[in-house]
């Protein structure tokens, strides 16, 4: 089923790794500021399990969409390897 997609799997992994951030790249244009987790679910932009997988997640969730490729690149370059985990 599509109740769990790559969005929830990424959130699960972010929790397992104690990640500092979770970057979601969507195919549609994303509002500024981006919607919160509940609104992402209401709009169908993330799967039904995403809110459960992000509950208690300490990572900053960044949602970028169509046309945001340069913003994604800047974020990843600025964070470098430290974007992965809080533990090292």
Image (tube, rainbow, N blue to C red):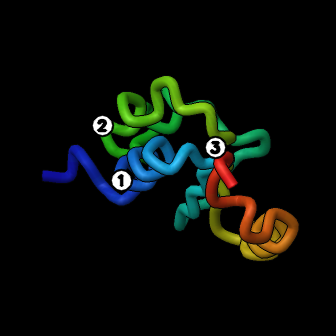
Q: Residues within 10 Å of mark 1 (few under 14, many from 20)?
A: some
Q: Nearer the viewer, residue 22 or 45?
A: 22
Which element type, helix, strand or loop, lies under badge 2? loop
Residue 36 higher or lower than 15, as above or below: above
Residue on which disc 2 sits: 48
- Residue at the (74%, 61%) spot, across then down: 82
Crowdedness near tag 2: few (<14), some (14–19) or many (≥20) residues, C-alpha within 10 Å: some
Mark positioned earlier in the residue sequence (1 or 3) = 1
**75 left or right, relative to 20:** right
Mark 2 or mark 1: which is in front?
Answer: 1
The circle drawn on residue 44 is: none
17 w.r.t. 35: above or below: below
Label 1: which residue? 9
Please name whichever residue, 9 or 5, is drawn nearer the observer in this view of the structure.
Answer: 9
Q: CA distance from mark 1 to mark 3?
A: 14 Å
53 vs 39, nearest the viewer? 53
Q: Residue at x 65, y 68 (%)?
A: 66
Dot 3 surroundings within 10 Å: few (below 14), some, or many (20 or more)?
some
Whether residue 68 appears in this view of the structure is: no
Mark closest to the chain's N terminus, 2 or 1: 1
Q: Residue at x 43, y 52 (%)?
A: 13
Give the residue number, with chain letter if any, for mark 3.
Answer: 61
Q: Is residue 86 left or right of residue 46?
A: right
Determine whether 80 is above or below 2 in the image. below
Image spot of residue 31 (x, y percent):
71, 46
Rendered location of residue 20, percent (x, y) = 67, 46
């Amino acid at each position: 089923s599509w109740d769990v997609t790559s969005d929830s799997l990424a959130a699960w992994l972010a929790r397992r790794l104690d990640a500092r951030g979770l970057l979601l790249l969507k195919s549609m244009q994303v509002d500024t500021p981006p919607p919160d987790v509940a609104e992402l679910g209401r709009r169908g932009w993330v799967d039904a399990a995403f809110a459960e997988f992000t509950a208690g997640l300490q990572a900053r969730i960044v949602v970028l969409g169509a046309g945001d490729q340069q913003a994604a690149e800047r974020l990843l370059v600025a964070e470098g390897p430290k974007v992965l985990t809080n533990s090292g």
